[in-house]
Structure formats: C-alpha cells, structure tokens
C-alpha cells in the first residue's frame, strides 16, 4: 500500500502547491504522512455530509477542491461546523488534502476538465500562466570527470523539465588550454607551463530559482580550481499549457443546443443552466472557467469566442457584458462545473497507483441551492 506522503507527492506534482494564489490555503490539512492509504475519496466541498460519507466508506484520504479553512482560525472545536467536519475525519483516521487554485490552472485541472466534459478540443488558456524563468548552464569538464559533474548539477535541480529530470547534453570532446600561474594548485598541468586537456562541453537547463544551488554544486564537483562555465538567461517560451480558464472548439451548434448539451453533461442541480444570448446564435469557439469566472469577463469580451461558460455571474457585470454585443453567456452551478474534475483526478490516481488504491467520487451533492420555485 502507498503511504500518504506518496499520494501527496503525486498530487502535488500534478497540481503544484506553489502555483496556488497567495490568498489560498492548499495542501495537507490533517493526517500522518507515513500512514498507509488504501482508499481515497474525492469531493468538491469538505462538508460534514461529505466527511461522514468518507468515514462510512472507511476512506484513508479525502481530497477536496475547496479549502476547509480558507481563513486563519484559533481553534476548531466540534461545536462549530468546520470543527465537526474535521473531528469526523480525524475520528475515522481519514486525512484531508486540498487542491484549489493550484488545480484550477493545471493541465488536467478543473477548467480543463470542464472544457473536455462539454466537448471542447484544441484547448488553450484564456489567461496563460507566466512561465518560470529558465537559465542554461554550460561548463567545460575533463572527459573522465563529466559524469560526476552532471550528477551533481542534476541533484541540485538542473535538467528538470516537466515529467523529466537529469536531462543534459554533452558534446564531442575538444581541447582546453591553460597555463597555471604562481599560487595555483592545478589538478592537471604544471605551474608556468601551457597545458592541453581533452574536455567535453556539458549543458543543462535549470529554473532560475535554482541557479545559485546548481552553480555551487558544479563548482564543488568540478576537478578544476577555476572551471570555465557560463550561465545564460533563456527567453520566456510563452508555453500556454497551463493558465486560467480554457478556450476551445466544437462542431458548430446553436447556443440553445450547446446549453442543452451542457445541462445533460453536468450533474443535476437546482441551479440549472442559465443562458444570456440569442438561442439561435451559432457557436463554435467556447471559453470556459471552472468556478466563479466573472473576473475574466473583460478578457473574454476581447477574445474571438462565441460563448463563455462559467459560474456565479453577478447581475450587473453580466448585464454590461451582454450590452456590449460580445459572446453569449452560460452560467452553471459552481459545484457542478468543478465536479467534472473529480473523475479526471480519479483516473490519474488509478493510472499511477493501479489496484493498490481504491478510489471513489463522492455521491453527495454539496451545491448549496436545494430548491427552485
């Protein structure tokens, strides 16, 4: 059985906590990282009903999208709603993990899951995430010392890209020349005499935040007193794999047909599907944002899309958006839109951990609206 820390490592690799908004509260809320995990339940909200469902199923870990404690607290007694939720989980030995805004932007995250659920293809973010600044280290090393230098810089963080690590390039041998001066203690050569050494060129990319650590590791592993090296800052690649919301394409349909398809695809809620726009308008380019998406209205208004699908649209921003004659609007329940991510995460966990782990998507509807008249 995997340990809780192993499951956390997987989820944090897919949805890095460092990409969460500053105001957010993500990561492990409670639980022993060394405990075994046999059953994982997935839900949008950490409500008391969800906690009871996890406890009755004997889940070892509950992964939720929304934080239990978004604001700081001084205590969590079981006399409060959130305290009762935490007490229920802790009493059954169930850990709690939150993946919120770090899951919103990621590949196979919330917005991407919603986009694929409603049939979009050729996805790109509405607002691309800023790429992490990257450098490239180039160093010249005696051929027989290249392997330990490559290993040292890799351990310090060089050569990590996406799902790969220890990536580097070594070019064909060339000749390095130098003359040690008085005071030098050369590993190769003699003070005052010109030396020629067979060297190779080792190159590796690295996150700029790792620059100091990688250079220190290279200097410590290199056999020369004064290695020849340089660090180049790389241009921003502007890769658009991650970011806020998604834009994609569908086969042309009317707005009415698109909205009806959304209603059939998403889990049922009393909120239903609200539409603003001409029902007969042809739709082929669609923007979506899982969760409350009115903060993207100005961005979407200037995009070549036919409809914007999101949640929690307020009266005045929606009315002003429609008045400008831009894309149509489709407003769905916040819970229903974000629920589409749970089966995606379930499939990823099954693919990574196989039969060593049981997974379950919560059957509890936690949308707060329970009646519409």
Image (cartoon, helix red, strand yellow):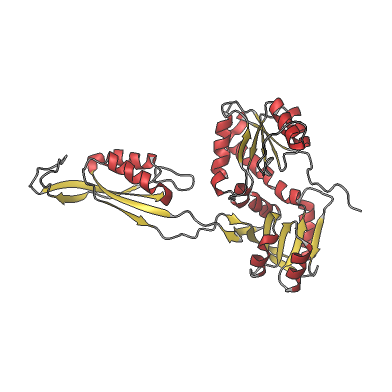
> Can you give x and y, in whole percent of width and height, for residue 314 in the image?
77, 61
> Could you tell me which quadrant the N terminus lies in?
top right
Task: Kindly identify the residue that appears in the image at 69 percent across and 58 percent down.
Answer: 293
State whether residue 212 is above or below residue 297. Answer: above
Residue 31 lies, with reference to residue 265, above or below; the image says above
User: In the picture provided, is 24 more to the left or to the right than 152?
Assistant: right
Residue 265 percent location from the top left of the image = 76, 51
**What residue occupies the far left of the structure in this picture?**
192
Q: In this view, does 161 lie to the left or right of 32?
A: left
- Between 354 and 227, the one lying in front of the other is 227
Residue 301 location, quadrant: bottom right
Give left or right: position of 304 versus 204: right
Compared across the picture, whether 368 is left or right of 216 comes to right
Furthest-front residue in this view: 74
Q: Position of residue 352 (x, y in %)?
A: 57, 37
User: Residue at the spot x=56%, y=41% of the render?
Assistant: 12
Q: Which of 28 and 335 is in front in this view?
A: 28
Q: Which residue is drawn at 14% across and 50% down?
A: 178
Give the residue drawn at x 67%, y 56%. 289
Where residue 86 appears, x then y in whole percent? 71, 32
Viewer-proximal residue, 308 or 258?
Answer: 308
């Amino acid at each position: 059985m995997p340990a809780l820390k192993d499951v956390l490592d997987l989820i944090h690799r897919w949805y890095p906590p460092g990409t969460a908004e500053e105001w957010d509260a993500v990561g492990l809320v409670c639980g022993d990282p060394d405990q075994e995990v046999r059953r994982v339940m997935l839900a949008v909200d950490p409500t008391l009903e969800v906690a009871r469902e996890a406890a009755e199923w004997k889940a070892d870990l509950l992964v939720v999208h929304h934080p239990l404690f978004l604001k700081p607290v001084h205590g969590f007694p079981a006399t409060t709603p959130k305290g009762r939720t935490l007490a229920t989980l802790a009493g059954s030995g169930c850990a709690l993990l939150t993946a919120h805004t770090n899951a919103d932007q990621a590949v196979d995250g919330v917005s991407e899951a919603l986009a694929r659920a409603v049939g979009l293809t050729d996805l790109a973010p509405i607002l691309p995430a800023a790429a992490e600044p990257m450098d490239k280290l180039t160093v010249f090393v005696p051929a027989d010392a290249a392997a330990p230098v490559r290993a040292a810089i890799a351990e310090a963080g060089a050569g990590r890209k996406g799902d790969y690590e220890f990536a580097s390039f070594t070019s064909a041998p060339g000749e390095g020349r130098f003359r040690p001066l008085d005071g030098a203690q050369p590993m190769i050569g003699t003070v005052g005499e010109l030396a020629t050494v067979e060297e190779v060129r080792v190159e590796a990319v690295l996150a700029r935040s790792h620059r100091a650590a990688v250079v220190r590791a290279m200097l410590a592993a290199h056999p020369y007193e004064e290695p020849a090296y340089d660090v180049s800052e790389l241009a921003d690649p502007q890769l658009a794999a991650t970011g806020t919301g998604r834009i994609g394409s569908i086969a042309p349909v009317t707005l009415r047909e698109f909205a009806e398809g959304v209603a059939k695809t998403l889990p049922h809620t009393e909120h239903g599907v609200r539409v603003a726009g001409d029902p007969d308008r042809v739709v082929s380019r669609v923007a979506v944002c899982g969760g409350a998406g009115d903060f993207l209205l100005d961005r979407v208004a200037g995009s070549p899309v036919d409809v914007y699908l999101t949640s929690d649209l307020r009266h005045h921003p929606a009315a002003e958006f429609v008045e400008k004659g831009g894309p149509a609007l489709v407003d769905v329940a916040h819970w229903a839109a974000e629920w589409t991510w749970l089966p995606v995460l379930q499939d990823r966990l099954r693919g990574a951990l196989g039969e060593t782990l049981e997974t379950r998507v919560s059957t509890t509807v936690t949308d707060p609206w329970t009646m519409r008249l």
